[in-house]
Amino acid sequence: MSLNAFITKETVESDEDGPLSGKTIAVKDNISTKGLRTTCGSTMLEDYVPPYDATVVELLKDAGATIVGKANMDEFGMGTTTETSAFGPTKNPVDESRVPGGSSGGSAAAVAAGEADLALGSDTGGSIRCPAAFCGVVGIKPTYGLVSRYGLVAYANSLEQIGPIAPTVEDAAGLLDVIAGPDERDGTTHEEGADSDYASAADGDVDGLTIGVPTELVDGADEGVEEAFWAALDELEAQGAEYREVSMPSVEKAVAAYYVIAMSEASSNLARFDGVRYGKSGGYEGNWNDAFARGREEGFGPEVKRRILLGTYALSAGYHDKYYAKAQDARAWVKQDFDEAFEDVDVLASPTMPVPPFKLGESLDDPLQMYLADANTVPVNLANLPAISVPAGETDGLPVGLQLIGKKFDEETIIRAASAVEN
């Protein structure tokens, strides 16, 4: 049975010899690939072929990687299950009756099923870590600014980051070595971290490491998920680490703040799909406003429309201060809580997802359930920190992911700890 992991299955080989020579890679379909269709999982862009490569794609080619296709995704990155794609849902290779997570579900499923050696995803509120956890692979959400976003079709600029998905921690770290670094075409990138050797950090040495466990990110998790999480921490303790509970009360407001900010930025970013600059155009009668409305009605799916409407409302006159401004205040509170926690610990740990993979179709009629499932991942994006999801056991035969969160540009520490879990 097909997993539907790819929207476009087409091989692009590199002539270069480099660290990724002989490696195949799936690229999420919101990352521009010159001459290769890039749809964002949407009817709005079903025929769009970019005239340029994203910076990360250029780096992949320079490193000798072979692109094997564009991976399926939730439409414009909006979802946690890869079921909102206009090209149909992707299935989880561990259990094809379940979702692979989202929005980078096609990328994670391709790696887990062996259809690609490596993959690129993008993470706005957990969209790399969630599918990595659900599919039993490794996913890294880098520090904001470590990897160029040039060529990534924008959903929420202040939150999203491109990152690697791979079968092992070392493979994911090696891919991060290739794509990390400043880019003059992306003013948010930094020099810091560019010279690190992330693959070498996957040495499993956690002797003396102090791990903080935010109780708010563990309470309420599925019983089987919680058991696997604590068992993984016990293993780390046996290897020389120590862990202690910490409190981060702000994370209880993180989901609400995240969705207000993300939807607001989405309503602005997706305004460009007006049938003139991008998107569906032509064949519509009536004035421009009617044609504009009809093109967006036909081009966007229900989840994208919902988020555009909510974001526009949050930014509208009379409501900006009530919603958007308060969400930014909550974001600052989340950042402050992380800063205080890192005064006493080296990394923070939680279950990546509080539940096992959903059944296909289970969450489509209840968007709030889908939003709340991001409770453990969105705080990291609000604080612009790095995090990794690494397999940490199973519950009822389904994968459980352990999330390790680091200080800004301290990917090496979370990679080291993740490799110890893996070992």
Image: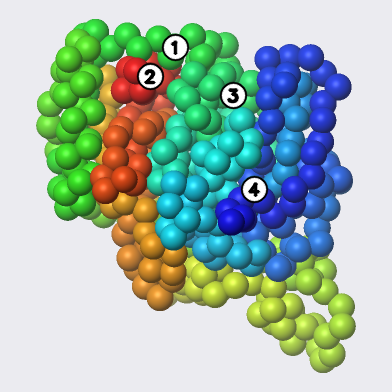
Q: Say if residue 241 shows up in the picture.
A: yes
Q: Which residue is mark 1?
A: 201
Q: Which residue is mark 2?
A: 419
In this rendering, the answer to whether 394 lies above or below 340 is: below
Residue 283 percent coordinates (x, y): 87, 83
Q: Position of residue 397 (x, y in %)?
A: 31, 45
Circles 3 and 2: CB atoms closer than 8 Å:
no
Q: In the rendered structure, which disc, 3 or 2, sits on the residue that comes first in sequence?
A: 3
First in sequence: mark 2 vs mark 1: 1
Relative image position of residue 153 (x, y in whole percent): 67, 50
Whether label 3 touches label 1, CB < 8 Å? no
88 sits left or right of 208 in the view: right
Q: Secondary structure at mark 1?
A: helix
Determine whether the residue tagged by mark 4 lies in a helix, strand or loop.
strand
Cα distance in 3D space between marks 2 and 1: 9 Å
N-term-proximal mark, 4 vs 2: 4
In the picture, residue 206 is in which quadrant? top left
Amino acid type, callout 1:
Ala
Q: Are marks 3 and 4 in contact (CB under 8 Å)?
A: no
- Element marked by disc 3: helix
The tag on residue 175 is 3
- Disc 2 and disc 1 in contact, CB within 8 angstroms: yes
Q: Mark 4 is on which residue type?
A: Ala
Give the residue pinned by disc 4. 71
- Among numbered discs 3 and 1, the one appearing first in the sequence: 3
Query: Which quadrant does the C terminus fall into?
Result: top left
The span from disc 4 to disc 2 (Cα, nearest Å) is 26 Å
